[in-house]
Image (cartoon, rainbow, N blue to C red):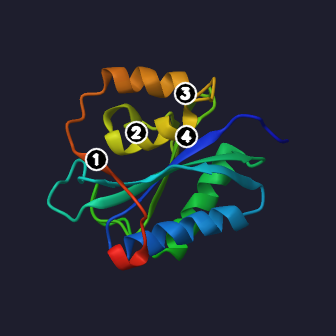
Amino acid sequence: MASNERVYLSIGSNIHPRVARIKQAITMLRQSTGITVVAVSDWYETEPWGKRDQANFYNVAVALTTTLTPTDLLAQLHVIEQQGHRERQIHWGPRTIDLDIAFWGARKIQTTELTVPHAHAAERNFVLLPTAEIAKNDPQVGPQVQTMLAANQDTSWIKKVRNVSEKDD
């Protein structure tokens, strides 16, 4: 069952090599059955959110379409995280790779495993700004992101990284 709804992921890493880890995750998304990557935002370097005493993150947003169910997409994201050696040891702690479903069209999803829009999306510059960049023409997600940005009180810094490459990481 194909859907014209766009799904937006937030992808981040703050454990060296950040750039290679994010590029690997995007490549794996592109190779996944039932997933079509339609846009990738610019890259952003961001201050850690929640637990500040750790390295800065690199973050991107990815827009995709999928024939997968939300549960199946989440499972695929977990596979990609596992292949990127993700370990869940410290809440909001350092991450080799983190893939979150931030938005799924106009859907509201609330299960024990998944909340969409992401429970903290409205509070995080590193989710909202990259997503706004690639969702501006999406009639379902663009307005949600703009509303969240207007009310956002996140004061953490975020800067666009030009010409990102592994040698800069």
Residue 138 horizontal/vertical position (percent): 63, 29
Q: Quadrant of residue 88?
A: bottom left
Of mark 1 and mark 3, the one earlier in the sequence is 3
The residue positioned 17% from the left and 54% from the top of the image is 52
Is disc 1 surrounded by few (<14), some (14 to 19) or many (20+) residues within 10 Å? some
The residue positioned 73% from the left and 47% from the top of the image is 66
Q: Distance between the Cα atoms at labels 1 and 4?
A: 17 Å
Task: Single out the residue that lies furthest toward the front.
Answer: 163
Is disc 3 surrounded by few (<14), some (14 to 19) or many (20+) residues within 10 Å? some
The answer to whether 29 appears left or right of 56 in the picture is right
Secondary structure category for the residue under label 3: helix
Pointer 3 residue: 142
- C-beta proximity under 8 Å, tags 1 and 3: no
Is disc 2 surrounded by few (<14), some (14 to 19) or many (20+) residues within 10 Å? many
Circle number at residue 129: 2
Q: Amino acid at mark 4?
A: Ile
